Amino acid sequence: MGYTSEVAIVLTQQSYHKGLIWMKENNIPDEENLLLETEKQMFKSTGNILMKFDHVKWYDFHGGFPEIKNFMRFLDTLDDEGEYSFTRVGEEYGDIVNDGWVDDNEVYVNTYIDIVDEKDLVKFDDNKMYVFVNVSAKDMLRYAMIMLEDKPYYEWRDKKISNEIKEIIMPRYRW
């Protein structure tokens, strides 16, 4: 699958037109020109152009994709202040690149924790007995005895396991 990133690029209208000219002057085929091959949006307030990529393999080094290499070569010709903004967030913690700046930039990086499947979560109640899938039967019995007898481990570790505990922990199994 490979390492992917989320990328947002903001160009002023002037920079966008400079890019179209630069790509033609450097004989970049249309299919390798991200300015032509990418869906774009425009900010109403500034007229700046946004190009956004989700889950893209943004490799601009040897072995990368020619359209990305060409685009990064073009960005290198622009002034960092006022002509473009480049933001890339990788999969690994801290892999964030910010380059350039445009007035009234509307692109910001937010870091947050995301739970893959929140529908799978339920409230955990310490007063209820749960059957844990990845816990050994021995540990489950210890937990049950603590919950039922409310005694520390050293007081019950050598006791015989009662039928009541067996039924609570694993009602489907025979002892």
Image: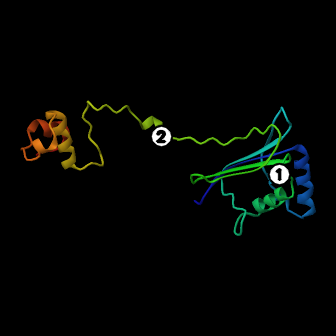
Q: Position of residue 53 (x, y in %)?
A: 70, 48
- In this picture, residue 117 sits left or right of residue 96: left
Q: Residue at x 26, y 30 (%)?
A: 127
Does the image show residue 70?
yes
* Label 2 CA crowd tier, 10 Å (few <14, some 14–19, many 20+): few
Which numbered tag is attached to residue 167? Answer: none
Quadrant in the picture for the N terminus: bottom right
- Residue 131, by quadrant, is top left
Q: Position of residue 96 (x, y in %)?
A: 65, 51
Q: Residue at x 14, y 38 (%)?
A: 165
C-beta proximity under 8 Å, tags 1 and 2:
no
- Residue 49, by quadrant, is top right
Which numbered tag is attached to residue 117? Answer: 2
**Residue 93 higher or lower than 130, as above or below:** below
Which numbered tag is attached to residue 80? Answer: 1
Q: Residue at x 49, y 42 (%)?
A: 116
Three-letter amino acid code at the position of disc 1: Asp
- In this picture, residue 85 sits left or right of residue 4: right
